[in-house]
Image: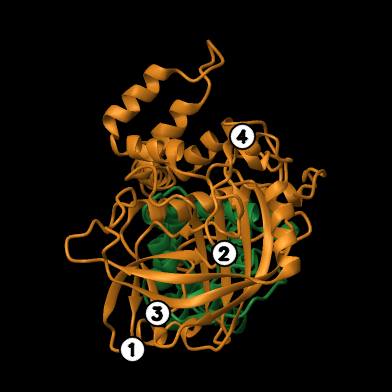
Amino acid sequence: MNQNRHFNLLARVLHWSMALAITIMLFVGAAMVVSLRYREQLLDLHRPLGLAILLLAIVRLANRLRHAPPPLPADLPRIQVWAAKASHWLLYALMLAMPLIGWGMLSAGAYPVVLFNGVNLPAILPHSPVLYGFLRPLHGVLAYLLFFTVLGHLGAALFHAWVRRDGVFGQMAKGS
Amino acid sequence: MPASRPHRGSLFLLLPIGLLLALVAFGFAWAGGWIGHDGLTPQTMVGTAEASGSPHPGFRRAHSKGICIIGTFAPAPGAAKLSTARVFSQASTPVLGRFSNPGNDPYSPDNKAAVRGMALQLKTDDGQEWRMAMNSFPFFAAATPEGFQAMNAAKLPDPATGKPDPEKMKAVLARHPEIVKFMAWSKNAPVPDSLANTRFNGVNAFRLIDAQGTQRTVRWSMRPHAPFAAANPEQLKSEPKDYLASDLDRRLAAAPLEWDLVMQFAAPGDPIEDPSQPWPDSRQETKAGTLTLTRAEPQAAGACRDLNFDPLILPKGIAGTDDPVLHARSSVYSVSFNRREREISQGKLQNGSPR
């Protein structure tokens, strides 16, 4: 066995910075759609943060494909192995899909995709009520799916750290 | 992996893990307004607008009846000194807009519309965009979204009698006395006999930012070149349902229609965050440009129907103020837009009268 026992430094930096960014993003998104007063301010944060998450997710996926992650404990029950793999690929899919759906949905709704005051992103879809009317609710539903997947991920991480004490948490929390 | 079997923790540790996850989930539910929110939400406000009449899938929840309009905007000399927005330096900017009647019926008769709306989208060659949503009233009905919501809720029919409860409205007026002024205006102000001679007011305050970064607080209005003529209330009763659209077509066939965009500057102490209080007419004003409308088309086939004229879509060089009604409009229009575009996406759009 000559495998890494820890995620590499880039993977760890990306994981923890994106954990923070995605958590902020989920709470900002949930709050802004019901806010009468702070929608504009929250949206001004939501769009650039979403683009940042998309770019970081691309770097992260490339790093993940080039550097195999440390192995799971050999004695981990098969159902947990399956849950770990499935949830990780779901997290990757949502990290990439959510910003793209958000960008595409604003494009389809003919909204300017404002990054910063005076700087807009180009539209990636044509103006289409049919597309907007599909993508906008999809963005909301997948946000809840992402939230619950993150919640499950957090629970599993703490289960490894506090109950199983099998070193899985340390693979991401510490260097080798 | 270490060869020795790790020392497992107690399963009782699942308890703090569960508690922590529950705490995060509660925090998220709170942020999303599922629990613990007493405050008014845009969803509630749109719900009240929907309850004011029968449903019309695919149409706006308020100001549902409309006509798309097409034209150009040309800035006045010197307007570029007020704001760096490209619209004030570009010789001509294409305009897509919409005239509207209040209420949630896209087929409502024009002769019952005491208030009219003008919404505009100006896209400049630097990729910036300015959307405006103006109305023919000179000031907003209420000082806050809460007051506006209370007024609209009190207008809904009481389930017991099928009619609005006057006691409810009395209570609302006692709590939000500024609404009395608006009711007097809507009862007494003469209604212009055409869209072409209607003045439209931005009502909310905005900030113009110049090249030095200086900010000026303004309210803007579109003032028609066509002279004001009041509709005869008796004659109005017998006007056909879409007489405003027919009149607009007739006038546009003869010549383009023009409005001046006029900026009114706040003086120190003027109520910037209260759209129910107009600033005195004596405040300094300046003409910032001219809107020229050349064409109108039915909204069912027009490009204006599927645009959200969110008044906080502003170009660089123009910014909103802390006026709570301005922010609420942005939130509420977004909910209305999401609901109606979803209906269109699901194929529920009603066919019928194009106006």
Q: Are marks 4 and 3 on the same chain?
A: yes
Q: N-terminal of the two: label 1 or label 3?
A: 1
Please say whether residue B6 is visible from this viewpoint.
no
Q: Which mark is residue A56?
A: none
Q: N-terminal of the two: label 2 or label 3?
A: 2
In the image, residue B336 sits, relative to residue B314, either above or below, namely: above
Q: Which mark is residue B317?
A: 3
Q: With B132 as the anchor, is B98 left or right in this view?
A: right
Q: Colour of chain B?
A: orange
Q: Which mark is residue B211?
A: 1
Residue B39 percent coordinates (x, y): 35, 39
Q: Amino acid at mark 2?
A: Ala
In the image, residue B188 sits, relative to residue A43, either above or below, namely: above
**Residue visible at 29% across and 50% down?**
B277
Instruction: Measure the C-alpha gap from mark 4 to mark 3.
Output: 46 Å
Seen from the viewer's position, the closer of residues B187 and A76 is: B187
Nearest-to-viewer mark from 4 and 3: 4
Q: N-terminal of the two: label 1 or label 4?
A: 1
Seen from the viewer's position, the closer of residues B108 and B312 is: B108
Q: Amino acid at mark 1?
A: Ala
- The quadrant where residue B286 appears: bottom left
**Residue visible at 65% across and 54% down?**
A138
Q: Chain of mark 3?
A: B
- The residue labelled by disc 2 is B226
Q: Chain of mark 1?
A: B
**Residue visible at 48% across and 85% down?**
B86
Q: N-terminal of the two: label 2 or label 1?
A: 1
**Which element carries disc 1, helix, strand or loop?**
loop
Seen from the viewer's position, the closer of residues B24 and B307 is: B307
Q: Which part of the image, by quadrant, shows the N terminus of chain A?
A: bottom right
Q: Which mark is residue B234?
A: 4
